């Protein structure tokens, strides 16, 4: 067993914290001792209200926290380039043996990920001078660090009772309702998309926050339009959010954590990629679509591309949506392909062991 220090800074959403918490929990369940340092842990009140055995949570930046007096662990993870506190980096340089220092990067399907995964970055100056930092890239191929997937996730998915879970929350579909979960950023064309969904019987489950606010603004207090009825989903724990994805016929997700969990759910999904002012998100979306659809027939692949592009560009809903059965098959085939690579935590443990 080793001690792991995972540093996370919450910027404007909670995706970074979601990824770091899942990693910390997975490490603890495999016998490691993770310490999660986070500057704003408030989202954990709903994401993980009971904490988790073996995971120590430390408020990074609190005046009473003796940061400089903490002995760095065997492994230090700098998540998403959050930059370690100088006092802690100095303690790392003084530790014998030095910790294995890893920069856990953002998920992408772009070609540079395979080229950059596992590269070292010697620290020539500053408080950590003399140390070496390693770049660890999550990804979708065997030449990357893989995706977070805890042991037995697919077994739990297969044993899930969708109807019982929905009924317990008052969301049991009526007749041939399809269930759609919505977790998104701002969508300028929300009214148009809701009209498209309302063309067939639909139960829309909108996550509280940006998604629910936009749905309420578009539908009003009735939360209904045509053949669509909506409900607001209060914040869920991470396991319960997985259940929401498993219970839905279509998942609209955003960022990184929910995006990965939607792929393990094995149901059709639309990824609302985080918008970047320089337009870099478009290349990132296209790189993922190229990988995700590389085995799909041209017709279904084209319709999935059209829907994903339209949603992420904030445009109107395409006139025709992907065939549900073909879309479902593609998602299951893609999940099967992803299962052929080791999960991120397994790869991370191996990566660290090889460099000690």
Image (cartoon, helix red, strand yellow):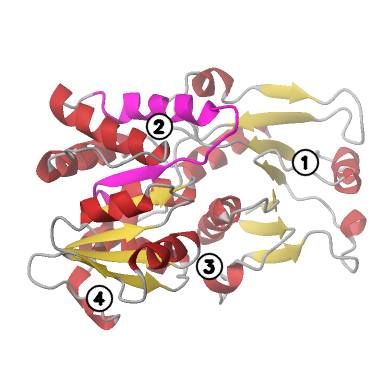
Earlier sequence position, callout 1 versus callout 4: 1
Label of residue 276 in the image: none
Marks 1 and 4: which is nearer the front? 4
Q: Are marks 3 and 1 in contact (CB under 8 Å)?
A: no
Label of residue 171 in the image: 4
Q: Residues within 10 Å of mark 3 (few under 14, many from 20)?
A: many
- Quarter of the image where one finds residue 82: top right
Residue on which disc 3 sits? 47
Residue numbers of the magenta segment? 265-294
Label 2 and label 4: CA atoms lie apart by 34 Å
Residue 136, position in %: x, y?
59, 32
For the residue labelled by badge 4, is the local secondary structure a helix, a strand or a loop? loop
Give the residue drawn at x 62%, y 54%.
1
Outermost residue, left direction?
175
- Quarter of the image where one finds residue 349: top right
For the residue labelled by badge 3, is the local secondary structure a helix, a strand or a loop? helix
For the residue pair 162 and 50, the one nearer the viewer reads as 162
**Residue 278 within the segment the image draws in magenta:** yes
For the residue pair 199 and 284, the one nearer the viewer reads as 199
Residue 243, position in %: x, y?
33, 65
Q: Are marks 2 and 4 in contact (CB under 8 Å)?
A: no
Residue on which disc 1 sits? 83
């Amino acid at each position: 067993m080793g001690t792991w220090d995972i540093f996370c800074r919450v910027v404007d959403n909670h995706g970074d914290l979601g990824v770091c918490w899942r990693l910390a929990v997975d490490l603890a369940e495999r016998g490691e001792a993770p310490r999660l340092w986070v500057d704003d842990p408030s989202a954990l009140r709903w994401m993980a209200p009971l904490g988790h055995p073996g995971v120590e949570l430390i408020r990074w930046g609190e005046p009473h926290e003796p940061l400089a007096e903490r002995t760095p662990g065997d492994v230090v993870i700098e998540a998403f380039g959050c930059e370690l506190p100088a006092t802690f980096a100095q303690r790392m340089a003084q530790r014998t043996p030095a910790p294995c220092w890893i920069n856990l990067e953002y998920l992408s399907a772009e070609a540079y990920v395979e080229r950059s995964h596992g590269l070292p970055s010697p620290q020539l100056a500053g408080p950590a001078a003399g140390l070496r930092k390693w770049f660890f890239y999550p990804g979708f191929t065997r030449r990357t660090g893989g995706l977070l997937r805890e042991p037995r996730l697919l077994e739990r998915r297969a044993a899930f009772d969708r109807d019982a879970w929905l009924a317990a929350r008052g969301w049991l579909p009526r007749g041939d309702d399809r269930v759609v979960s919505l977790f998104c950023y701002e969508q300028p064309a929300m009214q148009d998309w809701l009209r498209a969904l309302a063309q067939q019987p639909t139960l829309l489950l909108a996550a509280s926050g940006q998604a629910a606010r936009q749905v309420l603004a578009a539908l009003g207090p009735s939360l209904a339009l045509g053949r669509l009825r909506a409900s607001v989903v209060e914040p869920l724990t991470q396991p319960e959010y997985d259940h929401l994805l498993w219970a839905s016929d279509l998942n609209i997700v955003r960022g990184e954590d929910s995006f990965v969990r939607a792929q393990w759910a094995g149901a059709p999904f639309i990824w609302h990629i985080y918008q970047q002012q320089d337009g870099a998100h478009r290349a990132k979306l296209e790189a993922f679509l190229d990988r995700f659809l590389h085995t799909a027939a041209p017709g279904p692949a084209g319709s999935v591309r059209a829907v994903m592009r339209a949603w992420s560009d904030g445009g109107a809903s395409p006139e025709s949506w992907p065939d549900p059965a073909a879309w479902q098959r593609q998602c299951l085939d893609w999940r099967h392909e992803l299962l052929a690579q080791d999960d991120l935590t397994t790869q991370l443990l191996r990566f660290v062991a090889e460099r000690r």
